[in-house]
Image: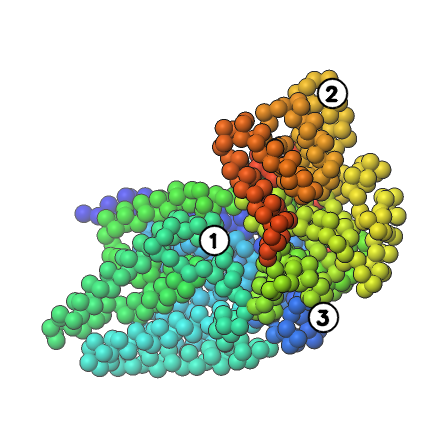
């Protein structure tokens, strides 16, 4: 006897589990943007709005192909540029939330069509959100591709009957728009091909296809042709259809380790939120369960008698088996396609009896388990911790904590022009705000520049030889780089810290410096006008600047402490720190002195930092952090013997525990490199060792992070 009250309770539990995941996803989607790629989409969209879909050249990169292709997401760029122009960043955030919600609703519709039961549909949607959340919270063209994929499934493949002409026309219309928004539109036709192959399999198993299958195959073939033809109406024509293959063959797309790594079902993921352990577990479970179910059903077809075979073939559910296989191939190719795990989940959902109370209980429980696991480390909770304070959630237009806003503000205000070297993840942001006056070296559009550009980028960023016998500085000259934009903090876990890379480099002039960035200008005849611009900028602000020695942040802080604090050169309580350094209370003096030591190291003022850190050690002889900084700064100044002595002192304090071993190894390596130089200069070895722990950096910003300057609406023109 069925108990509708219990079934209703199961559905409610499953729905609450879905909401428990969907709610945080929508909050993250509506938060101040942290999507790196959004910026180059905005910049490209601005160019398309001004020049049409065939711009004369790449609007942001100075390393782009001479015949740089039209961006395959050109319509997405134009769309976000239009929304931003009308509604600002608030408008973009609202559209983002709507797109993420739409994807979730379509996923629910897919599971509802597949499983029939609301409980199963809610549980399946929860699983889908656990796989797709990382892509849903980023304002990228995937927000078009994911709903479009689900819509194509619902229109053409979800039902057991042949799709109608109206549905085929709707699918072709989606393909037309999709092909202009994202090259992943090829997923749609690929799903139709998987459906056709599945129908062929049914024919082979049944020694011929029944009329219904032949009619369905004809409709799907017509749909495939209609989608392919419709997709040709884009600025790149047939080239858009081939984008994935040409990008993976001719560009450096596979060198980007975060999103294009292959899914490995046998190894625990180490990609953070890109592929959380929860998503890895769901995908593995879905793949194994689908494989077992398919094997059992295929074996049943093989063993069935002629009279039993039609029912066994029908039970095989070949279309959804084919879709599950297509989804598995895609997600095994790249972790960025983990959301396509929805198709193995749909295959499994169709196998579950919708009216079974036991199945409903299992589905509700599974949804609850997934919802409870989503906040686990490495999953959604990691991004949740990065949200701005509640009072800043709506105030911030974007999250300025992850982009070099102070550097951009200086470059805009000073009027400097030229070719820049920049961090990969900042390329879009810099390009949007600074182009065309300043063009960037790399951004996330790897198909727009040759693979050797990314090779040079990594070599230069790590101060290694770009070519045999060619130093990183020589590679910058070969690439005609005028501006080197260094960013980041020398902390544990920072993969590419570039702020101090050109400290003291011959032929380069430091023109801007703060605790989190440094800008160096190639000091040659080509940049004489740029030096004039910088000098004029500082003169107007009443800040000292030396044309031959560059910008001295300490001198600026002494002359204009208010300006230095306002521009992030020093922390907000810098004047208080200077006073507390001489406080009668040794504990107050020690804290202030240690923070000043961190500040001086971050600003590249190594001689002054050595004096301050020695003073800090006089107050606290057992402190490790000041000695670690001393080792690094002494090595930078060529005082290797004194650095080795400090390592000995650290060993005496720690008993040989970390960081003794790392620093001792560094001293030996630097000494060897000075005697026998190799492709890695001593400076590269020094910069590769973190000077600060994350805890030390947190203490340094006790009075708050650097101020994020306001940037002009719409970027620099």
Q: What residue sits right under mark 2 in the picture?
A: 583
> How far, Cα to Cα, is label 3 from label 1?
35 Å
Residue found at x 65% / y 54%: 89
Give the SS element for disc 3: helix
Badge 1 density bin: few <14, some 14–19, many ≥20, Cα 10 Å: many
For image coordinates 73% across by 29% down, the residue present is: 577
Kindly report which numbered mark, 3 or 1, lies closer to the viewer in this rendering: 1
Residue 53, horizontal then vertical, whole percent: 65, 74
Which sits earlier in the primary sequence, circle 3 or circle 2? 3
Is residue 10 toward the left or the right of residue 135 in the image?
left
How far from the left and from the top, in percent, is residue 647? 58, 34
Tell me the residue at 53%/30% (across/down). 651
Rendered position, 174 above or below 642: below
- Contact (CB < 8 A) between labels 3 and 2? no
Give the residue displayed 19% in from the left and 80% down from the top. Answer: 207
Q: Quadrant of residue 262?
A: bottom left
> Mark 2 packing: few (<14 Cα in 10 Å), some, or many (20+)?
some
Q: Nearer the viewer, mark 3 or mark 2?
A: 2
Kindly identify which residue carries mark 1.
274
Q: Secondary structure at mark 1?
A: helix
Above or below for 250 versus 292: below
Task: Please state which of the two labelled residues, at mark 2 or mark 1, is closer to the viewer.
Answer: 2
| Residue 708 left/right relative to 231 | right
Q: Under tag 2, what secondary structure?
A: loop
Residue 102 can be seen, yes or no = no
Residue 50: give its label: 3
């Amino acid at each position: 006897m069925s108990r509708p009250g219990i079934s209703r309770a199961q559905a409610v539990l499953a729905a609450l589990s879905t909401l428990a995941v969907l709610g945080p996803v929508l909050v993250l989607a509506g938060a101040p943007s942290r999507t790196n790629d959004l910026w180059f989409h905005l910049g490209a969209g601005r160019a398309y709005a001004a020049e049409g879909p065939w711009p004369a050249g790449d609007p942001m990169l100075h390393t782009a192909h001479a015949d740089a292709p039209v961006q395959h997401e050109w319509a997405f760029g134009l769309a976000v540029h239009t929304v931003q122009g009308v509604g600002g960043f608030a408008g973009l955030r609202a559209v983002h939330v709507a797109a993420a919600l739409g994807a979730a609703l379509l996923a629910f519709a897919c599971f509802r069509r597949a499983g029939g039961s609301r409980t199963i549909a809610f549980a399946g949607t929860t699983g889908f959100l656990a796989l797709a959340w990382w892509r849903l919270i980023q304002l990228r063209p995937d927000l078009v591709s994911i709903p479009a994929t689900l819509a194509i499934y619902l229109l053409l493949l979800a039902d057991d009957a042949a799709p109608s002409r109206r549905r085929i026309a709707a699918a072709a219309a989606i393909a037309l728009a999709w092909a202009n928004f994202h090259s992943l539109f090829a997923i749609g036709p690929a799903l139709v091909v998987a459906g056709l192959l599945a129908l062929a399999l049914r024919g082979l198993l049944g020694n011929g296809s029944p009329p219904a299958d032949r009619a369905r195959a004809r409709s799907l073939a017509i749909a495939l042709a209609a989608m392919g033809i419709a997709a040709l109406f884009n600025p790149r024509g047939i080239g858009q259809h081939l984008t994935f293959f040409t990008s993976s063959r001719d560009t450096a797309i596979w060198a980007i380790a975060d999103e294009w790594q292959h899914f490995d079902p046998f190894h625990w993921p180490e990609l953070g939120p890109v592929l959380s352990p929860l998503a890895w577990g769901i995908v593995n479970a879905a793949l194994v369960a689908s494989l077992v179910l398919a094997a059992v059903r295929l074996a049943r077809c093989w063993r069935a008698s002629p009279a039993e075979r039609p029912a066994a073939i029908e039970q095989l559910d070949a279309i959804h088996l084919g879709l599950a296989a297509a989804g598995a191939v895609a997600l095994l190719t790249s972790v960025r396609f983990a959301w396509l795990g929805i198709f193995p989940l749909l295959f499994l959902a169709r196998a579950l009896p919708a009216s079974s109370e036991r199945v409903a209980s299992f589905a509700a429980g599974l949804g609850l388990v997934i919802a409870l696991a989503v906040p686990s480390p490495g999953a959604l909770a990691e991004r949740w911790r990065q949200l701005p304070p509640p009072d800043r959630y709506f105030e911030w237009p974007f999250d300025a904590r992850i982009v070099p806003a102070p550097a951009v503000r200086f470059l805009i205000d000073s009027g400097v022009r030229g070719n820049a070297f920049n961090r990969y993840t900042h390329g879009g942001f810099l390009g949007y705000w600074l182009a065309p006056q300043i063009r960037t070296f790399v951004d996330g559009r790897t198909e727009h520049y040759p693979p050797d550009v990314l090779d040079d980028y990594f070599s230069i960023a790590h101060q290694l030889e770009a070519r045999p016998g060619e130093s990183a500085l020589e590679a910058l000259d070969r690439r005609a780089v005028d501006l080197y934009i260094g960013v980041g903090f020398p902390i544990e876990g920072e993969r590419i810290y570039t702020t101090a890379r050109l400290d003291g480099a011959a032929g380069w002039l430091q023109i801007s410096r703060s605790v989190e960035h440094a800008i160096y200008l190639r000091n040659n005849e080509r940049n004489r006008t740029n030096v004039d611009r910088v000098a004029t900028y500082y003169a107007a602000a009443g800040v000292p600047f030396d044309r031959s020695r560059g910008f001295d942040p300490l001198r600026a802080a002494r002359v204009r402490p208010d300006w230095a604090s306002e521009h992030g050169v020093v922390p907000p309580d810098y004047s208080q720190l200077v006073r507390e350094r001489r406080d009668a209370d040794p504990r107050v003096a020690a804290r202030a002195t240690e923070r000043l030591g961190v500040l001086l190291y971050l600003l590249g003022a190594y001689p002054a930092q050595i004096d301050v850190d020695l003073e800090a050690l006089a107050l606290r002889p057992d402190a490790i952090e000041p000695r670690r900084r001393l080792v690094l700064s002494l090595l930078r100044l060529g005082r290797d013997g004194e650095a080795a002595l400090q390592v000995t002192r650290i060993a005496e304090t720690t008993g040989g525990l970390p960081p003794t071993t790392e620093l001792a190894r560094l001293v030996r390596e630097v000494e060897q490199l000075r005697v026998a130089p190799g492709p890695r200069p001593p400076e590269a070895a020094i910069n590769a060792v973190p000077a600060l722990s994350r805890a030390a950096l947190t203490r340094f910003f006790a009075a708050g992070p650097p101020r994020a300057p306001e940037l002009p609406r719409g970027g620099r023109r």
